[in-house]
Image (tube, grey):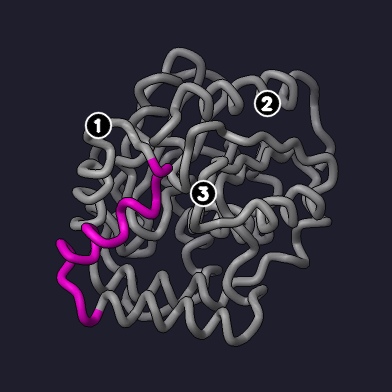
Amino acid sequence: MPPVKVNGQKIFYRESGSGPITLVCLHGISSNSRSWQRQLDLLAEQYRVIAWDTPGYGQSDDPPEALPMAFYAGQLAGFMDALDLPEAVIVGLSMGGVLAQEFYRQRPTRVQALVLADTNTGGGARPPAERKARLEGRLKALAELSLEDMARQRAPALLSPNPAPGLVAEVETMMREIHPVGYRYMAMALDGADTREILPEIKVPGLVLWGEHDRVTSREEAGVLRAAMPGAAFEVIAGAGHLSNLEQPAAFNRALTTFLAKALAAPTSR
């Protein structure tokens, strides 16, 4: 698909399928829209599926400076405007899940349902020492390692202990495509994000997914989301690490479609 311009910035995206329900898929901090290819391929018969490159990632332009998560949510709203998309099911994984929550805070009427996979409430919700260590660790790795070395060290931790052949190499390839500036800005935005206060106010159907071997986001963090979101459904993706949509796409897609078939069967008050 050709990129769109939002507030003077180029945003690239991938799209497949058609239908009355659109999924807008938001990737994690170490990847890009290609991480959703299995959803683009396998869900196209049921939904219109859109996966964007977050500003600072993939083929999208870098943000002009370090900006809070609210900026990215605003760009997402502009992106949907450019596609003439008034509302969608927002599907966010890891960093994309934090962005999805922030988007709901800003534009609740544009969210039909919220799917949060292997994510949390942002760095601002962590204890100060843990928050500081996490951000410094990310920035230190970015400053001291080549993207190749960073990908080689980090990719295995994003998957289960026994990933399918070729999967580690696929994740490494995506990580080598990181924009250093975009990654640094997003690490800072993620560190400053705190979505705890919005969770009890969510009035659309919610689904929390968690890979059973996720070594980045704990089950406890997933449980916080589930407990705070009124009526949220919860499912563990067996055999998956942090990138549950990529590692176990059949189970991930089945959980998503089953949830949406129930959640969107009747009108929802917002």
Answer yes or no: do the residues labelled 2 and 3 have beta carbons within 8 Å?
Answer: no
Residue at the spot of label 2? 259
**Residue at the image position 42 percent from the left and 72 percent from the top:** 187
Dot 1 lies on which element?
loop
Q: CA distance from mark 2 to mark 1?
A: 30 Å
Q: Is residue 20 left or right of residue 188?
A: right
Front in this rendered view, residue 18 or 251: 251
Residue at the spot of label 1? 165
- Does residue 136 sit above or below 158 in this rendering? below
**Magenta stretch: residue 153 in it?**
yes
**Magenta stretch: residue 150 in it?**
yes
Amino acid under label 2?
A: Phe
Q: Which residues are magenta?
A: 143-161
Q: Is residue 172 left or right of residue 21?
A: left
Amino acid under label 1?
A: Pro
- Does residue 246 sit above or below 257 in this rendering? below
Mark 2 vs mark 3, foreground winner is 3
For residue 268, which numbered disc appears in the image? Answer: none
Residue at the spot of label 3? 214
Q: CA distance from mark 2 to mark 3?
A: 21 Å
**Residue at the image position 37 percent from the left and 46 percent from the top:** 52
Quadrant, the C terminus? top right
Mark 2 vs mark 1, foreground winner is 1
Q: Is residue 214 left or right of residue 225?
A: left
